[in-house]
Amino acid sequence: MRADLSSPENFEALVREHQGLVFRTLTRMTGGGPHVEDLAQEAFLRLYRALPDFRGDATISTYLYRIVVNLSQDEWKRRRKERTYLASEPASLEGEEESAAWIENFAGDGLAGEHARTPEQRLSDAELQSAVDAELLALPEIERSVLVLYHQEECSYEGIAVALGLPLNTVRTHLHRGRKRLSERLRSRFATQPHPTESSGNSPSTRAIMAGKA
């Protein structure tokens, strides 16, 4: 018999296990800020309310991704209505470390993180990360969602398809378009600025993003 996930003890353990996933994904999809905590609380509240009908057809994490994407879409609609735009910033040192991991994962360069970086290189990485965050938020909602779930959360195509309720080939299409659009926006952004690789020792991760090979 499946454990009662809605019991206080089991639900608390469930929250502890998945809170990193929820905060991380919300931050990538909506930008950093105090709103993330409110959205995370709402995500777990929606999950708790849905648990009585949860049949285990998908994993809890996939179900949470679906909730997080819906909350993110609501947040984007609210911002458009208010005509506001919130910049994305890591809220803590942990957030900065996750940002670095996002850069390396997005670029497909698994070796970059193994080598020590100088302060100048770290500064360049931070500048590039800030640019990636800003341009990511400027992408169409569906492309942003697919990029975050695939590159940061390392979801499979199948997992993304289930979470977003999309056909598998549609997921592949949005991922391809999102990668291309993001790399184009980054190249355009840095076209009149010093190239970030000039001060970072030509980091393979940076080169891959700017070249659109992620």
Image (tube, grey):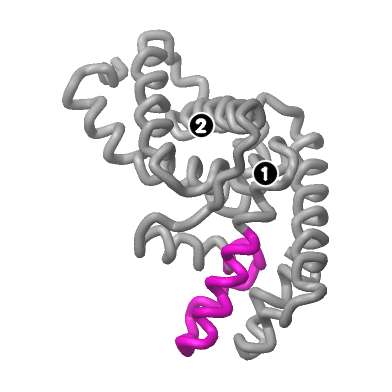
Specify start and end residues of the magenta stretch as a single range: 104-132
Q: What number is the disc on residue 70? A: none
Q: Is residue 125 magenta?
A: yes
Return the x and y of residue 3 as percentages of the image width and height: 27, 20
Q: Which of 193 and 170 lies nearest the eye of the viewer?
A: 193
Vertical arrangement, residue 41 with respect to residue 174, above or below: above
- Say which amino acid is labelled 2: Val
Q: Which of 144 and 76 lies nearest the eye of the viewer?
A: 76
In-image side of 42 versus 195 (left or right): left
User: Which residue is at 53% across, 52% downward?
Assistant: 88
Residue holding disc 1: 144
- Say which amino acid is labelled 1: Arg
User: Which residue is at 64% across, 40% downward?
Assistant: 145
Q: Secondary structure at mark 1?
A: helix
Residue holding disc 2: 68
Residue projecting furthest to the left = 9
Q: Secondary structure at mark 2?
A: helix
Return the x and y of residue 161 as percentages of the image width and height: 67, 32
Tell me the quadrant of the picture where the N terminus can be found.
Answer: top left
Q: Residues within 10 Å of mark 2 (few under 14, many from 20)?
A: many
In-image side of 138 versus 120 (left or right): right
